[in-house]
Structure formats: C-alpha cells, structure tokens
Amino acid sequence: MAYSSKVLDHYNNPRNVGSFPKEAADVGTGVVGAPECGDVMKLQLKINPEGVIEDARFKTFGCGSAIASSSYVTELVKGKRIEEAMAIKNSAIVQELNLPPVKIHCSVLAEDAIKAAINDWKAKHGKQVEATPADKAAQG
Amino acid sequence: MTQAQCPSCARLQAPRLFCPDCGAPLAVELDYFTALGLSRRLTLDSGQLETLYHDLGRRLHPDRFANRRAAIRNASLNATALLTRAFRTLRDPVSRGLYWLELHGEKLAADNKRVPPELAEMIFEMQETLAQLRDAASGSKPERENLRAQVASAHQRVETMLQDALTELHGNFERWDASVNPNPDLLVQLKAILSRIAYLRTLARDLERALELHDLR
C-alpha cells in the first residue's frame, strides 16, 4: 500500500516527539491502543489555567499512519482551547493525511488520544470529565 | 437453518458440507464449527481437527468432481474454500477466540481503546530501550552489547507473558465449554485477553526485529 506524501512527511519528520513529566499539574496524558493491530499511542498536552493547549508531545508505536496521525494532531491542537480540541473529529485527520479506508482506525485512535489527554488534565483539576468510548468500555 | 438442495441427487439436506446420500458437495454457507462437523466448543483437539480437515478435504476435492456438472464443480470449490478457512481459523487458539467474538456479535476493536496502564507502561519502557539500541549503532561496543542484552531480556519477558496469556486464554475457553448459560463476563474477559495478546505480539515482533537488525550489523 502506498502512503500519501503527507503521511510520509510526518513519518519521516515527526513533529513533537517526546514526553512531558506525567505528574506535572499542567500536563494531561492520554494513552490509547488499537487491539486489532497492537498499536499504542501516548499523547501529552500542556494546558494553561485558561484551558488553552500550549504544547503537545507524542510517542506512538505502530504503523506509519498511526505515527503520522499523532504527529499531525500535536500540531493541530497547539493554541486551541480544550473545548475546540475536544471537538476535533477523526475525519479532519483522514482528510489532511489522505488516509486510505484500512487506516481510518489510526485517525480514530488519535482523536481518542486527544480526548483521553484532556480528560486526564481535567481530572487533575477536579473538573467534570466527559465519558469517552474508551471509558465506557472500561466500565462495561 | 434452512435446508440445502443437493446439486447432484436433488434431495433436501440439513446444512453441511456434502450430501449424506450421494456424497456430492453442497453449496451452503456454514459457520466454521458446523463446516468441520464439530459442536461449538472452544477447547479443540488439534489432532482431531487435522484429521477432520484432511478427511473432508479428500471427499470434497475438486478433482473428484472434474467431470460433473458446473453446479457440482462449483459447490466443490466453494465447500473446499470454506473448509480451508474453517480449519485455518479454528486451528490457532487466538484466531479461534477472535472468531468466537464474531459469532457472539462482538469485535475486538469495538469500544476497546484503553490499554491496561501497567502494560502500556511496560511497552513504552521497552520501546525506549529499543530506540536506544537503534541510536547506539555508532556507539562503543560494550555499550551496544549492554543494550542488546537489555533488549534480549525484554524479549524473554514478553515471550513469557505471551505464554501466560495463552494459558489464560485456554482457561477462558474451558470456562465457556463448562457453562450451559455462559456468563456475559466470559466475553469481556475473552476480549481483554485477546487484546493483551495483540499488544504483546506487536511488542515481541518489534523486539525481535531490533535484535535481528542489530546482529546483522
């Protein structure tokens, strides 16, 4: 399967790879996985008290599309308010990276990683946390 | 299930791979257990499975029907393909478990994005060591050997965890087979064990590849 040039660009020059200290009060961490292929993604967001995402880091172990999707979202969320970031849909990632149908789950993973990271930050600050699909699965 | 008409003797038969009256293959869609003539049980004797596969494969072989009508020839091709899919799926415990989920209207990926935290922790730690090994290509020999040893021991640990997960999977299979009205928890557990196996297999593969690459240099 051929990757699009944007996927290759993010894959070869991933933006914002790395991590922040997980315990820091201004850092939200989201770890999500795709059990059908074993990919694991960690997204960390540095969020200021006004709820604006100031910086992002990721570490993803998986296919090129999963790495590209997470690299792209670190750029996408920077400067956004958490409400805006929560509203990011995987379709925006699919469109930007031109992902083929078999790789759409990678973009879903990246969307869920944003939500999980924001929810982690909210939980640290005693805010109401929105249930994500991952949370529902954990309860069910 | 509806009955199937035999393309050779035209009798109506209960869904199975071949007609019990004249031996011709039947064109039917069957679940993999029925195709192999097995009851729906998760614990399988691999020897028995293989014997069934070979026996049925001989009886349905397209060569035996090469001179028959097109409908019979096609039924033989379809039945052979179904038999092969059934055998390959049921032979391996992991793919058998995944197929079981499917039979119960479940999917491994559905509402299942949370990686158990301690497993995620271990994955990130080991991948970190892997990255160091990759970056150390130009480093000193003792440094590289030390990292190689770390990756090799991580690989050992993951293989042991995989074995344990497969044992756990087998335990889950036995509980399914022992219950008349299976507890819904069994499905949740099955999904969790299969997910764990998927993450561990991906990690094991990455570790193996890195070791191979390192040893090639």
Image (tube, coloured by chain):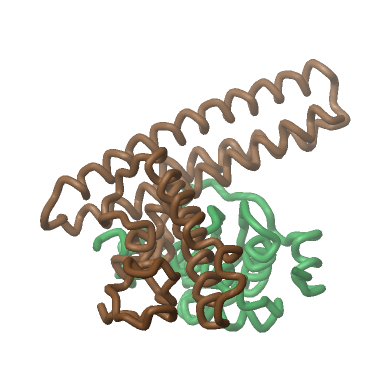
Chain colours: A green, B brown
Please indicate, yes or no, whether residue A28 appears anywhere in the rendered image: no
Instruction: Name the one closer to the observer, B130 or B152.
Output: B152
Up the image or down, B208 lies above or below B20; here it is above
Quarter of the image containing the C terminus of chain B?
top right
Vertical position of residue A113 compared to residue B50: above or below: below
Nearer to me, B81 or B66: B66
| Residue drawn at (73%, 61%) of the image | A15
Q: Which picture quadrant has residue B174?
A: top left
Residue B202 at x, y = what percent?
57, 46
Q: Left of A23 or right of it: where is B44? A: left
| Total tally of numbered discs in the picture | 0
User: Residue B8 occupies which quadrant of the picture?
Assistant: bottom left
Quarter occupied by residue B136: top right
Q: Position of residue B76 (x, y in %)?
A: 52, 70
Which residue does the image show at 80% across and 27% down from the upper left? B215
Q: Is residue A130 left or right of residue B215?
A: left
Q: Left or right: A63 with respect to A32?
A: right
Is residue A118 in view from this perspective? yes
Q: In this picture, is B104 found above or below B158?
A: below
Most distant residue in the top direction: B142
Residue in the image at 79% along x and 31% along y: B214
Quarter of the figure that contains the N terminus of chain B? bottom left
Left or right position of A17 against B27: right
Q: Closer to the camera, B7 or B127?
A: B7
State the image coordinates of residue A95 (x, y, percent, origin top left). 66, 83
Residue B179 drawn at (x, y percent): 14, 50
Q: Nearer the viewer, residue B10 or A111?
A: B10
